[in-house]
Amino acid sequence: MEKAKIGAYQLFVLILLFELGSAVLVPIAIEAKRDAWLAILLGMVGGILLFFVYYRLYRFYPKLVLTEYIEKLVGKILGKILSFCYILFFAYSAARVLRDFGEMLLTYAYVNTPLFIVNTLLILVIIYAIQKGIEVLARTGELFFILLYLLAITGFLLLIFSGLFDLKQLKPFLEDGWGLVLKVVASQTLYVPFGEAIVFAMIFPYLKDSKKIKIAGVCGILLSGINLALVMAINISVLGIDLASRSQFPLLSTVQSIQIAEFLERLDVFFMVSMVIGIFFKVSLYFYAAVSATTILFKIKEPSKLVYPMGLAILFMSITIANSYSEHIKEGLIVTTRFLHPFFLVVIPVILLGIAYFKNWGRKRKSQNGAKNASMSQKG
Amino acid sequence: MPSFFKLSQRKKLRSKVKKQKEDPMKVDELTEPIYPLLEDQLSFIKRKTGNSADVVVRKASFDEKLGIKTAVVYVEGISNSQSINEFLIQSIIMNRELHRKSPEKDPFDILKEEIVALGDVKIHLDWDGVFQSLMSGETIVLVDGCSKALSASTRGGEQRSIEEPGSQVTVRGPRDGFTESIGTNISLVRRRIQNPNLWVETMKIGTVTKTDVSLVYIKGIAKEDIVNEVRSRLKRIEIDSILESGYIEQLIEDESFTTFPTFYYTERPDIVAGNLLEGRVSIMVNGTPFALIAPTVFIQFFQSVEDYYSRAYLATSLRFLRILIFFISIIAPASYIAGTTFHQEMIPTQLLIAIAAQRETVPFPAFVEALIMEVAFEILREAGVRMPRAVGSAISIVGALVIGQAAVQAGIVSPAMVIIVAITAIANFATPSFAVAISARIIRFLFMVVAATFGFYGIILGILVLAIHLTSLRSFGVPYFAPLAPLVPSGLGDSVVRTPMWALKKRPSLIANKQNQTRMGKNQHPRPNKSRGMVPRHPQEDQE
C-alpha cells in the first residue's frame, strides 16, 4: 500500500472511467439484439448488488484491501493461494484489455503497424502513471472525465443535427422474450463491465471518507450503466440492428456516419480519443490492483520498482495470450466470461462475505453478551 | 649544504603566509572584536576591502584637547551621500564642544545619542557586522579608543525609478512596476495593503553576495505550514550568490525535473498584493524586479491580472481563449503532421485536395517541413530577443521574407505549413505567462516527433503523459492542477471561469488559512433600487 488519499468524487470518476473503458467501444450485449440496452441496465443492477458485496466485505476490514482480508478470512495458506490467483486474474485482465485495444487500433487506423509497438507505447504511458501512484491516476481521471463528456456531448449533438436517429430501429421491444435478455445478463453484462468493479476493493482503503464509498460507487456504476445503455441504443438506432451486430466497433461506425455540411465528417479522432482514454484507465486500474496485490503478498518494500517488470509481463502477456484476434475473442467469450469472471467476481466474494458474516456474527454475539453482562453487573 | 628537508620546510612556511594574505574573507579574523585604536581600525578596514576606491574614509577630530578622533566610513554609490554629509559629518564637526562640556561621558555615547541625526542606528562589537552594514550602504562611525562601531542607515544611491513593467502589460490597471531595489518593492506592496498583518521577514542569502531576500505574507491569511515550509527551504540554501529570484526558485522548488514553472513570477506589485490576499507568500530578492509567488497552481498561468479589473464575462471568455491558445501552441504543428501523414481520410476531401496540391512541389515529408519551419522560427525569435533594438526591424523584415514568401516560392515548404507555423507562433506569444509559453515551445517539438511516428495515437498518448505529469506536480504541497484535479468546488469560481466579483466569496481553500477564508460580507450582489421598468409606481409620483 502506498501513502495516498483520494476523495469520493475521484473514486466516482475512476469507477465511471473504468466501467466505460472498453465496454463503450465494443458491442456488448449485442446478443440481446434490440434489447441490448435493457440487458445492460439489468446487468448494471446486478453490478450494483455485486458492488454491495465488495463494499460489505470492505466494511468488515476498513483498513485492508481485498488480498489482505482474504488471508484473514480463509487462513494463511489458502489465502495466499487465492491472493496469488487474484494477482494473475488482474494481470490477465489488464493484458486482455490491452490486447483488445491493440487489435482495435490495428484494425481501423494502423493497419501496417505491429501490435507490439502499439501496445508498448500504451503500456509505457501506463507504467509512468502507475509509478506516480493512485492519487495522480485519480487526478488525471478527473481531467479526462471532463474531456470525455465534452466529446460525448458534442458527438451526441452532432448525431442529432445530422438527423441519423431512427428510434423505430429499437422496436419491437422484447422480440425474443425475457429469456434471451436474462441469459445475456447472466453470461455477460453482469461481469463485463459491472462486476469488474472488484478492482476497487484494492483501492477502497485509500478513501478519505469511507462513508462516501457507497454513494460514489453506486453513482459511478449507475451513470456508467445508463451511458452504456444509451450508447448501445444510439448505435442500434443509427446503424440498425443488422449493421450494429455485425460491426466490430459499433460506436466507431456511428461516429463515422456523422456528416454535417460536408465538412464535419469522419470524426474518427473522437472515437480514438475516447478509446485511448478509456482503455488507459481500465488497464491502469487492473495493473495497479495487480501491483498493489503483489507488493502485499510478497511484502515488497518499494512498489515503484515492481512497476516496470509487471508492465513488461503484462505487455508480453497481451501479445502471447492469443495467436489471432478471433482466437482472442473466442478465449474471451469461453474462458473469461464462463469460468474466470463468475469465479473471481461472484463466487469467491460471496463466499468470503459469508465467512466474514459468520466470523463477525460470533464475535458480535460475544461482545454483545459481554456488554449485557457488564450492564447487568452495573445494575446489580 | 642546504638539506632537502629544510628547504621543503621553508616552502611550507612561505605558503602559509601567502595564504593568509590571499584570503581576506577569512572568518575567524572577522569574528574578532573591534580594535580600540582608530588607526588600527581604519587600516584593518582598508586591508579587508583591498583599498577599494569606493570605500570612503573621512576623519574628523572630536575633541582636540584630548585628541579624540572619529572617522566616518561609507561606500560611495550605494549610500545616500547627502544625508551622510548633512546628518553625520556636518553634525560631528558642528558639535565638537559637546564632549568638552561633559568630559565624563563616553564620547561614543555622546555620538550615538546626541550627534548622529539618522533613523536606524546600530552598535557593532565585531567586524562581521561592521562589514555587512558597510557593504549594504550603511555608514560606519568609529571613535578613537572605543572598541565598538556605530552604523547608521544611509542606504541610497542611484536606482532605476519606478516604471511601467515591460512584461505583463495591461490595458487597465496600475502602471507601476517593481525595480531592482527590494526596499522600493516592499513599499509598493505595502502601499496597497496598509495593514500591520503584512509581515516581511528578511534574511541574507549567499555567502559572498549577502543578498537581501524577503519573505512577504499576510499573517492570518497565509497558511502557517506553507509559510514555515517556505522559510525552512529558504534557510536551507547555501550558495555563494543570489543574483536573481530564479536562483532561489531553482533551489527551493518541489520538482526540478519539469519544464513547467512551480512558481509564479511577476514584476507587478498589484499581482503580488492580490496573491498575498489569496493567502500566498511572496519571495522578493534584492537586485531584481521579479518577485516569486508560491504556492502556484497551473491555472494561474492562464489568468491575467486584468481579469479581475474587467467584467467577469469578458474575463471568462478570455480565459477559455487562453487555454485554447495553449493547446494550439502545443499541438497545432503536430496535428498537421499527423493529419497529412497518417490520417488523410479524416481531413475533408476539399481541404485534402488543396493541401495535397500545395505539397506537390515540396520535397520533404511533412515532419521535416514542419521541423524546418519551426526551427527557423525559433532562430528568428531568439535573434529578435537578443539583438540590439536598432536591428530588430531588420530581423523582422528578413524573417517575414525567409519564413513567408521566399520559402514558399522556392518550393521548400507549403503555404499551409506557413499558416500553421504562424498560428502556432502567435498563439505562443499570446500565452499570458512567459514561463508557460517557453515550456510549450519545448513540448511542441516532442509532440511533433510523436505525431510523425504514430499519428494521432501518439498525440493522444502525449497529452495523456502531459496530463499525468502536470497532475503529479505540486507546489509547496498544493496539487498543481487544483482546483480542477483534485476538484475543489469552492475554488472553481476563479479557475477556468471567473465568476462576478460578488460571487468570489472565498479565498482558495487549499492555499489560504482555514480559519480565514471568507473575503467579503454577505449580500454583496449589487441590487440598487430600480427607477424605471417593471417597478411598482408610487402614487405620490403620479401627483407630481
Image (cartoon, rainbow, N blue to C red):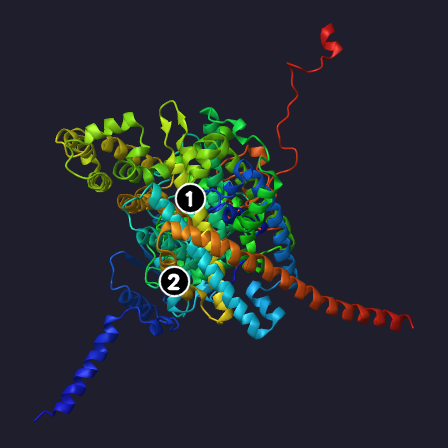
Q: Residues within 10 Å of mark 1 (few under 14, many from 20)?
A: many
Count of numbered marks: 2
For the residue pair B155 and B237, the one nearer the viewer reads as B237
Residue extending farthest left: B1
**Separation of marks 1 and 2 at Cα, in angstroms:** 23 Å
Point 55% across, 60% down: residue: A344
Q: Residues within 10 Å of mark 2 (few under 14, many from 20)?
A: some
Residue B472 in sight in this render: no
Residue B356 in sight in this render: yes
Q: Position of residue B176 (x, y in %)?
A: 41, 37
Quarter of the image for the N terminus of chain B: give it: bottom left
Which amino acid, by three-letter code, is at mark 1? Met
Point 46% across, 34% down: residue: A242
Would you say B441 lies left or right of A39 here? left
Residue wearing tag 1: A275
Host chain of mark 2: A
Would you say A226 lies left or right of B6 here? right
Q: Position of residue A55 (x, y in %)?
A: 63, 56
Mark 2 lies on a secondary structure that is: helix
Which amino acid, by three-letter code, is at mark 2? Ala
Residue wearing tag 2: A313
